[in-house]
Amino acid sequence: MVCRAMPSSVSQTRPRPLWATAGTWLAGVDGALPGMVMKAAPAVGDAYRQEYRPGEAEDFAKVLQLDASWVVPMGSYTHVVVTEDTDLLDPAKLEQKFYAPSVGFLGSTGSVDGHKEDTKLSSILKSGG
């Protein structure tokens, strides 16, 4: 099975110096593995780790649907892949995420940090003019 994988690297910055890297890791260090956002050819029921650094980042996804429809401010999409995402370190966190072909992440809905949270794609910015 072919997978597209990428390491997680996130930093929070102020206008100048780097000030926080909490929750980040480097694959191969301290038992951490590369993260996977989405399988190249997902199938309903597929389950995979999105992030893995033992005790630090243990997000998990399961493919629920392959042919959903979803509407966001950016437009209407079909053939949407829907995943159920959980955090094995925080069982109260439960999200559904939506991905469209040729676009990627459309948004999510679920419970995060004890409250309902929804995100929806509103625009796509092209780089380089």
Image (tube, rainbow, N blue to C red):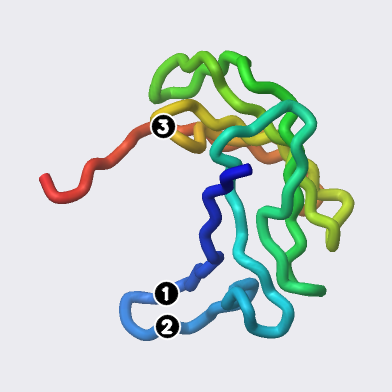
Contact (CB < 8 A) between labels 1 and 3?
no
Assign a secondary structure to mark 2: strand
Q: CA distance from mark 1 to mark 3?
A: 27 Å
Q: Up-down: is 51 above or below 80? A: below
Q: Position of residue 70 (x, y in %)?
A: 56, 18
Task: Say what secondary structure mark 1 lies in.
Answer: strand
Mark 1 burial class by Cα count in 10 Å: few <14, some 14-19, many 20+: few
- Which amino acid type is marked by label 3? Val
- Residue sitting farthest toward the front: 1
Residue 103 disc label: 3
The x, y position of residue 105, in whole percent, is: 51, 37
Task: Please report the residue visible at 71 percent of the width from the left and 84 percent of the height from the top.
Answer: 30
Give x and y (percent) for residue 83.
69, 34
Q: CA distance from mark 2 to mark 3?
A: 30 Å
Which quadrant, please, contains the C terminus? top left
> Decide: marks 1, 2 in contact (CB < 8 A)?
yes
In the image, taking residue 115 as reference, residue 108 lies left or right, namely: left
Residue type marked 1: Thr
Image coords of residue 80 (percent x, y): 56, 22
Residue lying at 73% horizontally and 48% vertically, measured from the top left: 48
- Dot 2, crowdedness within 10 Å: few (<14), some or many (≥20)? few
Query: Sequence order check: which comes first, mark 2 or mark 3?
Result: 2
Q: Which mark is residue 13?
A: 1
Q: Amino acid at mark 2?
A: Leu
Residue 112 visible (yes or no): no
Residue identified by numbered label 2: 18
Quadrant containing the N terminus is top right
Please give left or right for residue 127 compared with residue 85 in the image: left
Quarter of the figure with residue 108: top right
